[in-house]
């Protein structure tokens, strides 16, 4: 007897339909699994066999079972096909019946005792099910929250194979769960850190505000203990709220990576990722024999903080050039060619020299000029050009360090950032651009008009700093953001002057 169960698999950040076809016929008692399965899928036969027996179902040991995962020309991976295969076998052997089977999609991993374990990628699967006109989704109970993000689906969370069989045999007696994004309350302002905790560093706080207002990348340079990491961790607290589409994109990425908290369902806050400098290229940008998202995709619509910037492998950093420009990372492998989103804010920090005390007012630098030059040259010019804001983070003096006066709160700074972002939303409402950092050359011609004195100052800065074409674009975008924070429609000389100072380290801390 033949049965067909609809399941799903993930390719990139989207899911596609996989039909699990099971044919049970008299034969020599073999279990054949075809359809380009990976190792985890091929092992499902033993899991299904044990799960069925321990759930008091009969596994047809004397039958010839052929399981096909269609389409057969696309690689299938992961243990999420265990449950649909088991349900297909139960239907093919007449142990359960279901007339409306075409309206269901099923996914889940089976334990040997018949319990159902959570799987990765349920949110994109649920979205695919809705697009394909499915009415119901059977998922592991641990994946309920993310499946319930999708409105218009009947969600049946199951803890065991027996529970899934009951849905088929007694579907009228089991009440489905319906969710939708309206059932998820936003997590606005839920942070365990605040900008008011930062002592002093007014110039760096201003740079953070500009970075947040325009979506700009940022580099901080200063001695150890000056507060670079402390400041970077507070950038998400002043960024605007995520839109619903942004929340869904981030949640899909974390679902695919198997990193979604079972209690959260929908991520509503911007993520802060801080990988160690020993990370591999595949770990940072994504990869593997079958590509998975890396740290830059996990930072999508959030903040990626690279501490000890020069200590990262130079080849790894160079791979980031294309994602920083395009907001996408394309990974090509023999098994697949996938594209993941990577629209992030990069915040990097570094010491000015190997010992960290070059130019420090208290501790003397012990590095030779040659070692300082080699250290600073680890950051290439093209990478530095992609960091819009360069700011020095000096050591706090004793008065600042011992002061109990709180600084301006994240909420107050965030209000100004939101006002600036609203101006940008109105400006770019009919374009794919979301903020000033994403402006294209044609957008800059339209929206970056300057007064004559501002234009003259910019010409002088280009000559004195020998700015590259990309650095020139960065200065202009920064000036546009500073003008937005001031509520100005046209870029003035003070805006250009402040923007230029954030590029003054192009020559001071690098040798190109």
Image: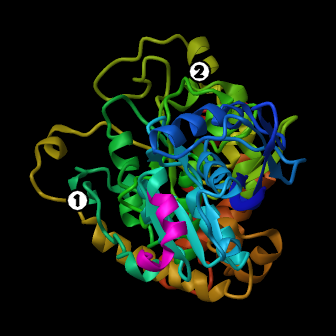
Q: Residue 445 is drawn in which quadrant?
A: bottom right
Write down the residue under mark 1. Answer: 196
Mark 1 Cα within 10 Å, few/some/many (few <14, many 20+)?
A: some
Write down the residue under mark 2. Answer: 375
* Whether residue 111 is situated above or below residue 191 in the rendered picture: above
Q: Position of residue 443 (x, y in %)?
A: 77, 77
Stretch in magenta: 163-180
Picture residue at 50% right of the left edge, 35% below the top: 275
Seen in the image, is 482 located left or right of residue 384?
A: left
Q: Position of residue 40 (x, y in %)?
A: 66, 33
* Whether residue 70 is situated above or below residue 459 in the rendered picture: above
Seen in the image, is 465 located left or right of residue 242?
A: right
* Whether residue 12 is situated above or below residue 349 in the rendered picture: below
Q: Position of residue 463 (x, y in %)?
A: 75, 52
Q: Residue 168 is drawn in which quadrant?
A: bottom right
Q: Residue 138 is drawn in which quadrant?
A: bottom right
- In the rendered image, which quarter contains the N terminus? bottom right
């Amino acid at each position: 007897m033949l049965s067909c169960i609809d399941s799903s698999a993930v390719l990139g950040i989207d899911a596609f339909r996989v039909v699990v076809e099971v044919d049970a016929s008299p034969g020599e008692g073999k279990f054949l699994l075809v359809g380009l399965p990976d190792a985890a899928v091929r092992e499902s036969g033993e899991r299904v066999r044990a799960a069925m027996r321990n759930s008091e179902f009969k596994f047809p040991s004397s039958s010839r079972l052929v399981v096909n995962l269609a389409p057969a020309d696309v690689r299938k991976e992961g243990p999420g096909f265990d449950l649909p295969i088991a349900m297909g076998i139960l239907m093919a052997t007449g142990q359960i019946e279901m007339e409306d089977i075409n309206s269901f999609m099923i996914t889940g991993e089976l334990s040997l005792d018949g319990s159902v374990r959570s799987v990765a990628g349920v949110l994109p699967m649920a979205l695919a099910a809705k697009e394909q006109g499915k009415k119901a989704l059977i998922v592991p109970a641990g994946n309920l929250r993310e499946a319930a993000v999708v409105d218009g689906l009947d969600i049946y969370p199951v803890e065991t194979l027996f529970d899934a069989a009951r849905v088929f045999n007694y579907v009228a007696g089991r009440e489905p769960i319906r969710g939708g994004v309206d059932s998820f309350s936003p997590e606005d302002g839920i942070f365990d850190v605040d900008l008011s905790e930062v002592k002093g560093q007014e110039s760096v706080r201003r740079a953070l505000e500009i970075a947040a207002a325009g979506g700009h990348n940022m580099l901080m340079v200063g001695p150890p203990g000056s507060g670079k990491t402390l400041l970077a961790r507070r950038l998400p607290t002043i960024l605007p709220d995520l839109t619903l589409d942004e929340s869904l994109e981030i949640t899909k990425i974390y679902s695919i990576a198997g990193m979604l908290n079972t209690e959260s369902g929908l991520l509503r806050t911007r993520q802060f990722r801080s990988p160690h400098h020993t990370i591999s290229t595949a770990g940072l940008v994504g990869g593997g024999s079958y590509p998975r998202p890396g740290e830059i995709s996990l930072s999508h619509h959030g903040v990626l903080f690279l501490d000890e910037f020069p200590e990262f492998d130079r080849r790894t950093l160079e791979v980031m050039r294309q994602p920083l420009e395009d907001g996408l990372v394309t990974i090509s492998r023999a098994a697949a060619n996938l594209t993941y989103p990577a629209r992030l804010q990069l915040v990097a920090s570094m010491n000015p020299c190997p010992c960290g005390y070059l130019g420090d007012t208290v501790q003397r630098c012990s590095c030779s000029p040659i070692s300082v030059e080699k250290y600073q040259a680890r950051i290439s010019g093209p990478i530095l050009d992609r960091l819009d804001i360069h700011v020095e983070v000096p050591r706090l003096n004793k008065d600042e360090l011992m002061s109990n006066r709180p600084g301006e709160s994240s909420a107050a700074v965030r209000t100004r950032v939101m006002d600036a972002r609203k101006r940008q939303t109105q400006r770019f409402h009919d374009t794919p651009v979301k903020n000033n950092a994403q402006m294209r050359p044609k957008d800059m011609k339209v929206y970056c008009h300057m007064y004559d004195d501002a234009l003259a100052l910019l010409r002088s800065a280009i000559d004195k700093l020998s700015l590259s074409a990309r650095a020139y674009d960065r200065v202009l975008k920064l000036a546009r953001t500073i003008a937005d924070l001031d509520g100005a429609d046209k870029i003035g000389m003070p805006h250009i002057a402040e923007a230029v100072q954030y590029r003054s380290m192009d020559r001071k801390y690098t040798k190109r």
